[in-house]
Amino acid sequence: MMNSSLVLLICFVLLFGFASAEAREASDSSGLLVVKAPKLYIGDGRVIENGAVVIKDGKIIQVGPLSEAPQGAAEIKCPSGVVTPGLIDASSTAGLIDKYSWTEHSSEVVSHLNVLDAVDMRSRDFERLARQGVTTVYVTPGSGSVVGCRGCVLKTAGPAGERIVVSRGSVKATMGRDSYRRGGWNRGPRGRVDFWTRRPTTRMGVTWIFREACFEARKYRDARTKPGAATVPHDAALESLAAVLDGQVRLRVQARKEHDIWSAIRLCKEFGVDLVLEEGTEAYSCVPELKEYGVPVVYGPVFAYPTGFRAGSGEANEPCLNTAGILHEAGLLFALTASDLSGEGALPHQAGFAVRAGLPRAAALRAVTAAPAEILGLSDRIGLLEPGYDADLVLWSGEPFLPTTRPIAVVVGGEPVHVAGITGAELRVLQRAAKESPEK
Amino acid sequence: MHCLKLAFLVLTAACLPVLSVTAAQDDESALRADKIALKAGRIITVLDEEIENGVILIDRGKIVEVGKDVEIPYDYWVMDMSDKVVFPGMVEAHTTRGIDRTNESLPVVPFLSVYDAIDPSNLAFEDALRDGITTLLISQGNNTVIGGMSRVVRPIGRTVDEMTLKAEAGLKLSASPMYGQDRLTQMAILRETFRELEEYLGDLAESAYEKDLEKKGETIKLGPAAAREKGAALISDKDLDFRHKNLKRLADGRLAAYVYCGAAMDVYNAVAFAEEHGFLKRTVFVLGSECYKAVDLIKSTGRPVILEPSMIHRETDPLTGDETEVFVPLAFFEAGISFAVTTEPRDVYGLRYPWYQAARLMRNGIPRETAIKAITITPASIIGMGTRLGALMPGYDATLLVLTGDPLESGTWVDKVMIGGRMVYEQEKDYRLKELLTGQEQPVEPAPQGDQEEKAAEAEAAPGQAESASEANKDAGKSQEKAPPSGQ
């Protein structure tokens, strides 16, 4: 049931003819999808009035005024809408189906493991994210290990074979209490030693484990590049860490409190490693240090009172609502994230609340599109509405990130994955029918 | 007149130290002015047209006139808000904020009142002011069969009496089972309570009739049923004991009933029960999300509803795992039912703000006019304050918000709050909010000192010294703490 001002026209037959295998015919406009709206926000600050985005084979091939759009192609349009690049959440927990699969407890250093192995690709989390306009997520591992496993970058929807963008991403490290919150007393009953008792119990232990792991990785790497390398047994975890030390694999460090952020920077300086700061609840008071060392921040969620695992951590009691604004003013590269939140705490609303607290609107759009793309090292593929980029975009019912705005249509990899007014089930049925139908 | 002024001053003085957000101290005359002319860039009256560059005349806490070309009498204190938007204070029609535990363990407690549980210093009231909620109906929670008495309050005042706008605002009931109970037991308890009430009243009537005859020296000639009938006219509220008084008022339709229905089936039970026991005409339905399915039945009763803050009903298909989401207010809007929207004070994001809830209504296709009414005049009317609150019209209380922009825009903040003609909140002085927004500790102005000059001078010097000393310590500490990142 929609307002007359939100009328959405879709030529379904043509549209899904495109999705079917037989669609690539000789005709000029077949296989094309055109998204038209009164405003296109490219993502780098440019705005095109009355524009159209032309999509073919899952990529954007043209972005420009309506007049230049090809005729006769399948189209999605909205008379009052705004098109933006698909949103990117750089620190999501999507697809991790239960809390215990977030963290591998068998060792403190698990940099050889991949969180992708724990992700359920069919989880409803991804559908919810897609409905909210989030088209790409970096799934970050849990924070229970000091040196944790490696994340991955996934598309939240779209063609099945193209959903995994990066299967082995950054290594995650955690400063702060999260790795010793559970099993904290480090006492086995009757003095028994179990894996809980091997864990660190203080921040001193946490930083020691990190340093020790990096030392070992350095030793390992040096030994493997010298003669006699064959005698050094292969150690997958150290292999990954060695790649981090060499700068081939990025390092993400989760830290909430000010002194944890300082520790992270200090440790990374010691080993000459770049880092990306995750969560950064008190990053607002570390701006000079972050700037000096050039640390991008994946900040979020915005909150006045912490929820979820942040609430129990005891580290989130001094938030600043305008952290995003402060980071922006300092000229730092930062992305906003909704982490584990959905509903009214989802990424578009995170951006909305960041704007309310003082972040300029254009910077907010960048913080959920081009900036996370840059942080993930995918800035040539996602985050902008430019020819050659992945066809991931959102058609909003109005100015994005306002509480009165919602996504009308979400396209991932050239495929519409959410259309307002049509349930997911109906959309899938239509897509299947189009694929199976013999018509062009 | 003197008494009124004195009470006014005392009330104002009493409120000042309590709130961490005090009104302008350099504009004290405005604080105490009886007559205020508020010039505003935009006035949203809710019940009438919006006014650009208008004036609101306020006299002793009531709006006297609202209009575009209003002549300001010479003795009115002028407040210039020409760059701001004036909006009625928002009304929360049903909440448990401010009370510590929301329900008793006993199922039938109509003799309790939230009066005894409201804590005026609860942070929720400070937040209410900050977010623009100027009137709240505080009631017990939903985990009951027949709960206690609700109360309409304003979020200012040091005692509950000072906060109270309406002392006996209605009884809480629940058609949804109490925790650990099932619906059979719930309905059985409800029926038994009223059956017992009938019996009690009957006995009371009979003995009243007998006493009356005794007084007159006559003998009883009628049977029990007839005696009861005659006796009923002789008993009044003051004869009833505490367990039955409010129930009788409820049954007579003299008390509002806030009936919570968690599921659609509870609505059927609630309507049937309320009708049978004579209080359907005073019933307000407090609904869980599934109750949108009973919208036709609710429509037939003609009664208004209060919706819970999430406003979304989610169901997961057991076979396919597909989630469907229904936006609940839409069903009520389409049926033409009067609905009030509430907020969730414990929510971290938009659900705590009434304006955000109204924006969500618009997001889902409900017109702006209805959305604005759903947080102002509609809840005000539902709680029986519709002629005093929720709109900016002559005769209404001067309880309003001065906003930095349109109420439904996310960039708008509450700049000032006026309750009953007095400024009770200014964002300028909201140190807690400032600290939250900037992450920096804000200097708090020392409280006004006593009359003695010496004392004042001493007090001024001491905190200053202490402050600068602690600041110096802080700087030293910070530079020490800074060393580790660069050193080592």
Image: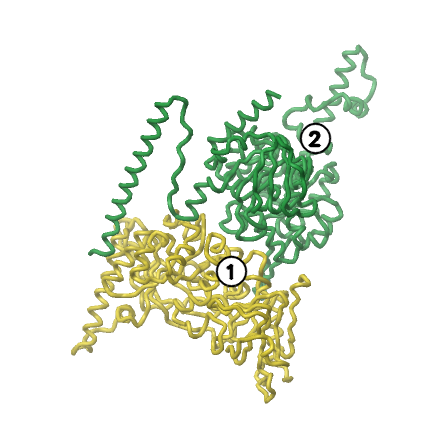
Residue A348 disc label: 1
Q: Which chain is yellow?
A: A
Picture layout, residue B449 above or below residue A362: above
In depth, the one of B412 and B239 nearer the eye is B412
* Other-residue count near label 1 (Cα within 10 Å), few / some / many at <14 / 14–19 / ≥20: many
Residue for badge 2: B249
* Other-residue count near label 2 (Cα within 10 Å), few / some / many at <14 / 14–19 / ≥20: some
In the picture, measured across the screen, residue A119 lies left or right of residue B414, that is left
In the picture, measured across the screen, residue B139 lies left or right of residue A253, that is right
Rendering coords of residue B414 (x, y %) = 53, 45
In the picture, measured across the screen, residue B213 lies left or right of residue B36, that is right
Regarding residue A126, the answer to whether it shows in the image is yes
Query: Of tags 2 and 1, which is closer to the observer?
Result: 1
Q: Which chain is green?
A: B
Residue at 61% in and 57% down: B363
Secondary structure beneath dot 1 equals helix
Rendering coords of residue B432 (x, y %) = 44, 42
Rendering coords of residue B395 (x, y %) = 68, 35
